[in-house]
Image (spheres, rainbow, N blue to C red):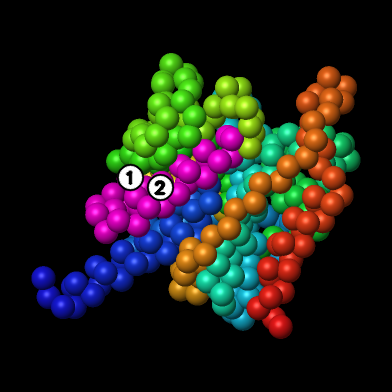
Amino acid sequence: MSHKKLKSKTKRVRLLKVFLIITGAVVLTVGAFAFMILNDVRNTVNDKIYEEITSIDASATKAKIKNDEPVNILLLGVDERENDKGRSDTMIVMTLDPNNDQMQLFSIPRDTEAEIIGDGRTTRINHAYAYGGSNMAVDTVENFLDVNFDYFIKVNMNGLSQLVDSVNGITVRNYRAFTQDGYHFPEGQTTLSGSHALSYVRMRKEDPKGDLGRNERQRQVIEGIIEKGANPNMINQVGDVMKVLGDNVNTNMDFEDIRNLATKYRNARNHITNYQMSGSSKTSSGMYLIEMSEEEIKKTSNMINNFTLETKR
């Protein structure tokens, strides 16, 4: 292989790895780094994946990217079903800091009690997507945590199975043996196919940690996809990954946004911190809710906003 061809292939693999890192906080986006490999996928991103929403100021976001400022991304894992829009059972706030090469992931339990902005009801925060789609979900989480989002990424969680299969399976370390959907998951290192991965992240009732344990398994699967996707051999799976993403992902990132993030934020994975919001259980009108204290909400908000301010000092 010539030096020029080797350099070109190396660059494509690096871009694939970068995009996997940037969008890799949920199930969904990880394989999207494949979009950076070939220019002929530009139309796929802009015409099939891209979704404009009014709750995010695109011009303000582009200014932040131009100035290398940290950005906040809302990741929504939606369990869509036939004749049902679904609810965002996975909600993660991802903050990327290009100046200090670091990333923060904040998990919000789906049963968290919150005011649904644009609707007026106070109920489970994951109902926001069901009531008003990505726009209402963004507005609700922004109000709840007093933060501003630059991007959102929504993924149909049923696409998780296809995404894992598109990278030929992943390996995770399971910390508690359990059975879900007829599959048994032993304690220790285990390899997951697509259907296994979907059951692995959906289990909650057998876990004494409930949603906290499920969110941890979701992050494990995400990291597994990132690691697998970062392998140079992933170049051969690009077509499969792109098809899965095209069928299951929506985001307000257009092709140029993705390219800019891949260029400027590629080292964010160097330092990753995770935080799981926690509150107290309650029942209201027969509905189970998690009530977050003002202290917990303020703490989370400060971690996100102060993280953003650090690079401006």
Look at the numbered disc 2 and give the secondary structure of its residue: helix
Q: Are marks 1 and 2 in contact (CB under 8 Å)?
A: yes
Q: Nearer the viewer, mark 1 or mark 2?
A: 2
Residues rendered magenta in the picture:
213-241
Give left or right: position of 208 versus 282.
Answer: left
Mark 1 neighbour class, 10 Å CA radius: few under 14, some 14 to 19, many 20 or more:
many
Query: Which residue is under mark 1?
Result: 167
Question: Residue 220 placed where, x, y %?
Answer: 48, 43
Residue located at (23% from left, 75% from top): 7
Q: Nearer the viewer, residue 109 or 235?
A: 109
Residue located at (74% from left, 66% from top): 305
- Name, please, the residue furthest toward the left: 1
Position of the N terminus, as image quadrant, is bottom left
Query: Which residue is under mark 2?
Result: 225
Question: Residue 231 placed where, x, y %?
Answer: 30, 56
Check the image and report above or below for 222 versus 303: above
Give left or right: position of 105 versus 181.
Answer: right
Q: Amino acid at mark 2?
A: Ile
Task: Please tell me in which quadrant of the rendered image residue 76 appears.
Answer: top right
Residue located at (42% from left, 64% from top): 18
Give left or right: position of 241 versus 280.
Answer: left
Q: Amino acid at mark 1?
A: Val
Look at the numbered disc 1 and give the secondary structure of its residue: loop
